[in-house]
Amino acid sequence: MLRRLFAEFVGTFWLVFGGCGCAVLAAGFPQLGVGFVGVSFAFGLTVLTMAYAVGHISGGHFNPAVTLGLWAARRCANKHVLPYIAVQLLGAILASAALWIIASGKPGWVPAGFAANGYGALSPGGYSMGACFLTELLLTFVFLLIIIGTTSKGAASGFAGIPIGLGLTLIHLISIPVTNTSVNPARSTAPALFAGGDYLGQLWLFWVAPIAGGMLAGYIGALLYEPAATIETIITEQPASDGPVPV
């Protein structure tokens, strides 16, 4: 169990540090040619790289909405749900803390939104609460369908990390202008704690909408796809050392 939790911690740390780090440190430099396209690929690449690095240990969730969605799909054992979410939040918060220390080392740095998510006045494009809620719900729903579908029996073995990472990239390309893209309550919580103010007040949406979308996809995926043998097949067919998880 400790190996699983450490894998989830490291994976979520890397997702937040890499994705939000690109947004905070690199996206503001036009000469680098990064922009929101680069940020989209940064988030996708964090999931892709950690999926293959530690996904065979824990299943490669790195996201409370994914954990709850896979639980709804009967891909995650009850005993893993709360511990996974706890270490995901811890990894995300420590990643944001490290990012804050690095970013504040530049004279005159202004944190602004610190890559946090928001709606209304805090939406990058000024989108309404309803538009942002629907965006997060739909995109998390699709993200979980990608995860469940690519790890189901009959899917190409060992390649799930690629469509999952590219799927997250596409999700960011669609929704950065709308919500700054969450689809991940841990990713949303950590920057909001440092940005403070109204970002914390709006954080509820970036828990409720992704979890609702993820769990809806889980229930549908359980009916639509044949189950994978164990949770570890999310990336490879190599089992974790502490045994298979009931599905």
Image (spheres, rainbow, N blue to C red):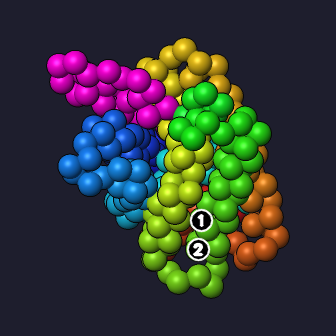
The x and y percentages for residue 62 are: 50, 47
Q: Is residue 1 visible?
A: no
Residue 96 part of the magenta segment: yes
Instruction: Please tell me the numbered disc located at residue 150.
Output: 2
Q: Residue type at mark 1? A: Ile
Q: Residues within 10 Å of mark 2 (few under 14, many from 20)?
A: many
At a point 58% along the width and 72% down the height, the residue shown is 151
At a point 56% along the width and 23% down the height, the residue shown is 199
> From which residue to which does the magenta span run?
88-116
Q: Residue type at mark 2? A: Thr
Find residue 231 and report its image quarter: bottom right
Image vertical order of residue 192 relative to residue 53, above or below: above
Q: Residues within 10 Å of mark 1 (few under 14, many from 20)?
A: many
The x and y percentages for residue 58 are: 48, 54
The x and y percentages for residue 77 are: 66, 51
Q: Which residue is mark 1?
A: 147
Find residue 110 and report its image quarter: top left
- Left/right of residue 12 with respect to residue 171 in the rendered view: left
